[in-house]
Amino acid sequence: MRIDLELLIRSLPSLLEGTKLSVAIMLFAMSLGVVIGLMMALGRLSKVAPLRWLATAYVTFFRGTPMPVQVCLIYYGACPP
């Protein structure tokens, strides 16, 4: 199998656009994750019992279910047929 350098050079602008989009999505997801994680950590340390219970239930749910199950629940929950 031979690498077609001409095809690679022609595809480079599209590959770079895809890379930029991937980095933007990653930065957004990391930022959102830090904010949600901080809120859950503060909720679990709270002296308000219902807030602590909710944060604990949230953390327990996401730690206890496999990632593909979470993705399906979020996708089909956010985009009903």
Image (cartoon, helix red, strand yellow):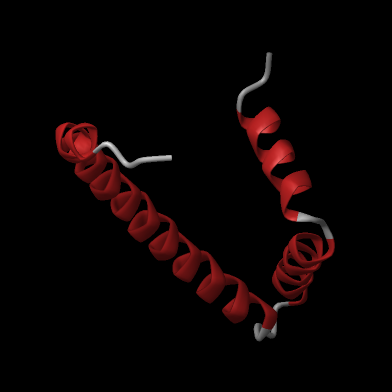
Depicted 56 relative to depicted 42: above or below: above
Which quadrant of the figure has residue 31?
bottom left
Percent x, y for residue 76? 69, 28
Left or right of residue 31, residue 73 in this image: right
In the displayed structure image, the side of residue 38 where residue 51 appears, left or right:
right
Give how far across and how far down residue 61 sits, in percent: 80, 60
Identity of the residue drawn at 18% across and 40% down: 12
Question: Relative to 43, does residue 22 appear above or below in the rendering?
Answer: above
Compare residues 56 and 12 and report the one nearer the observer: 12
Front residue (pair 21, 34): 21
Residue drawn 80% across the image and 65% down it: 57
Name the side, left or right, on which 50 lies relative to 2: right
Q: Residue at x 68, y 13 (%)?
A: 81
**Could you say where residue 34 lies in the image, as x and y percent from the top left?**
46, 70
Residue nearest the observer in this picture, 20 or 38: 20
Residue drawn at 24 percent across, 48 percent down: 20
Quadrant of the drawing holding the N terminus: top left
Task: Tally the numbered discs.
Answer: 0
The x, y position of residue 29, in whole percent, is 43, 56
Residue 5 drawn above or below residue 48: above
Give the residue at the far top of this rendering: 81
Q: Residue furthest front?
A: 1
The answer to which image quadrant residue 46 occupies is bottom right
